[in-house]
Amino acid sequence: MTTPLWTISIDAGGTFTDAIARSAGGDILEAKVASTPLDPSQGLSNAVAALEDLGVELADVSLVCHGTTVATNATLTGNLGRAALVTTRGFRDVLGYRQSNRPEVYSLTPRRPSELVPRELRYEMTERIDSAGRVVTALDDAEISELVERLRADDPEAIAVSFLFSYLNDEHERRVGSALRAAFPDRPITLSSEIAREFREYPRTATTAINAALRPLVEDYLNRASEALSARGVEAPLLVMQSNGGSVPAVRAGREAHKLVLSGPAGGVAGLAALAEALDEPNLISLDMGGTSTDVCLLRESTIPFTTIQEVQDHTLLAPTVDIHTIGAGGGSIAWIDQAGSLKVGPASAKAVPGPACYGRGGVEPTITDAHAVLGTLGAGELAGGLRIDRDLAVAAVERIAEPLGMTAEEGAEAILAIGLAHMIRAVRKVSVERGLDPREFSLVPFGGAGPLHAGLMLHHMTLKNVIIPLRPGLFAADGLLVAGLRIDHAQTVLRVAGDAAYPEIADWYATAAAESLEQFAGDGIPAESVSMLAQIDCRYQGQGFELGIALDGWDATALAALPELFHAAHLERYGHSNQEEPIEIVTVRLAATGDVSRTREHVSPAPERPLPDTAVVANREVLLPGFGATRVPVIARSELAAGTVFAGPAIIQQMDATSVILPGQRAQVVSTLDIIVTESAARATGSAGTGR
């Protein structure tokens, strides 16, 4: 892919839509506009218009990368398309009985999980393929014709087809799929063998159904997004970030809509990996805090963690996904009092509309953002997107919960922040301490619009190596969208015993998948020399129920022969034991192909330490810092901080896209990349106060 004059990356969140444009000459322009939840494509168009006003020649843009929450929100709210499911006779209710486990095993009144497809839209076909991929009962053409007529009468928006053992032999699915595509050319048809060639019946069927139900919504949105870009004069290819941390052209993104469920957060993790490389800090924990939720991801040895199965609401989804832990604690999380009179924060959110009370857009419920406005850490004035902070409205909102608890507005605000902070600390411990990892070996990277507001508090209350505040924290996820490049994932369940007899077949599968990836990337304009491949095999001891993913150094005879020892070592590390004599079963083979996209990077030379310049302090503000009381704090303009600048807290750092709070006893240093590294004083770092120590 040739080096573009301008590349644009746009991340559409719940409250703001963030955009960054980079030129081949190294120019960088930033825009942050209010999101438009009713029609996210309008927010996309507004972001592009804002970049144009800043000087981007839209006719010279040759690549646009986009992170979207359309699939996320539809799945979480259940606002999916009306899909039908075609399956093997006798398996009509697989979406109902699922995996036969009870999520709330001790509940006397368990909630029945939602079903993706209503029973009246599930159709059975008399066909059968066995566990070896052999046809037991042939598919009848007359029954296919009857199916078409029934579907024509019921008129679903999309159709999913998932037959038993079709991941081994997709002959029947392809025949039904061909007939349905001929009969319904304007309707999305999803075959399980095209998107999830893996075993386990419920996850594969649920994945197929989710993809089918999402496609009408996602494809419609991506069409509108493409039209909005074209209307602005942007004719460049549109790439969409997937849950796997890589992008894909919009046309393919629509066909594989289920892979967009973590589209937005994955961009932040891609940026996290780039930051780890730039700062030579291999161990990082992200704190991506937006308006509705906070996403936490742990990078160990610069390696992005992936999972092949994700739980979304009540459903299991088969798709390579960045391993992100999400909690319902964002800037817009609402504080409320339960029936026992206890203060709670989240997971309900004020969302983009009406938003926190201090935005002055009709919100009246107190939120974490309102708590900061009351305490002064988020000062009055204008935010991105034309929003203004109104402290009086924030005080009125916080008093709704403070007065019943016998607190002042300021005390109520501190209580809200304390509970929100406890949620964040618990999330960080979830991905570190609870996995046997020491947080003292990791740096916390807070980003998103609300993340840096809690940078100092997180460092004060947890034993961390330090905190790294990125150069553009509020735009960090948007900027990360282009870092990972394009990605194609292949997977195939094989269920073979590891050994010389199985390896040639597996090597052939990898060679075929690699060739298909190179051909696809060539069509996307990415040369073979810019493509990297990562092979993985999911293995288990024979008789086990779950697998471990083992990364391979290629798929030649030498790499495959090393598989048993690699598996024994991984099993020993994970479970504390291994059995060299036990046969190993190869369950699923996987290949991830990544194509690099050209991206200009900033070059900043290292600089010696220097004091904070007087010009950087734009105001002094009386604030209430939680745990420190009323304090007069300098307000520092981030744009005035050159590499090498060192200063001590307390301080508030303001910039267009975020506000950062540094507490007393903390030291901030601007490094060569213009990121800020915050450390705790030696005396406090060895103390014992605070949550999480």
Image (tube, rainbow, N blue to C red):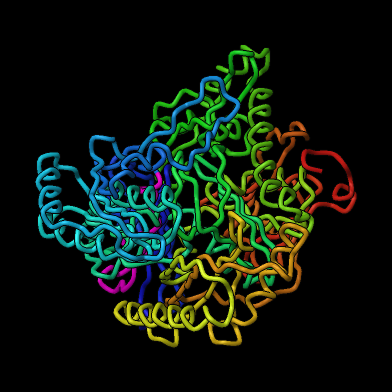
Q: Is residue 61 magenta?
A: yes
Left or right for 239, reference 556: left
Q: Is residue 120 above or below residue 300?
A: above
Q: Residue furthest front?
A: 136
Task: Give residue 679's quadrant in the image.
Answer: bottom right
Residue 231 x/y as whole percent: 19, 59
The residues colored magenta run: 51-72
Task: Give residue 402's quadrant in the image.
Answer: top right
Residue 97 x/y as whole percent: 42, 37
Residue 203 x/y as whole percent: 43, 50
Dividing the image into 4 quarters, which one contains the C terminus? Answer: top right
Q: Is residue 169 magenta?
A: no
- Judge whether residue 689 can be spotted in this image: yes
- Residue drawn 46% across and 31% down? 350
Q: Is residue 277 above or below residue 130?
A: below
Nearer to us in this view, 417 or 202: 202
- Residue drawn 57% across and 60% down? 639
- Residue drawn 70% across and 33% down? 624
- Judge whether residue 55 can be spotted in this image: no
Left or right for 240, reference 649: left
Dividing the image into 4 quarters, which one contains the N terminus? Answer: bottom left
Q: Is residue 79 above or below residue 618?
A: above
Nearer to us in this view, 134 or 251: 134
Left or right for 687, reference 443: right
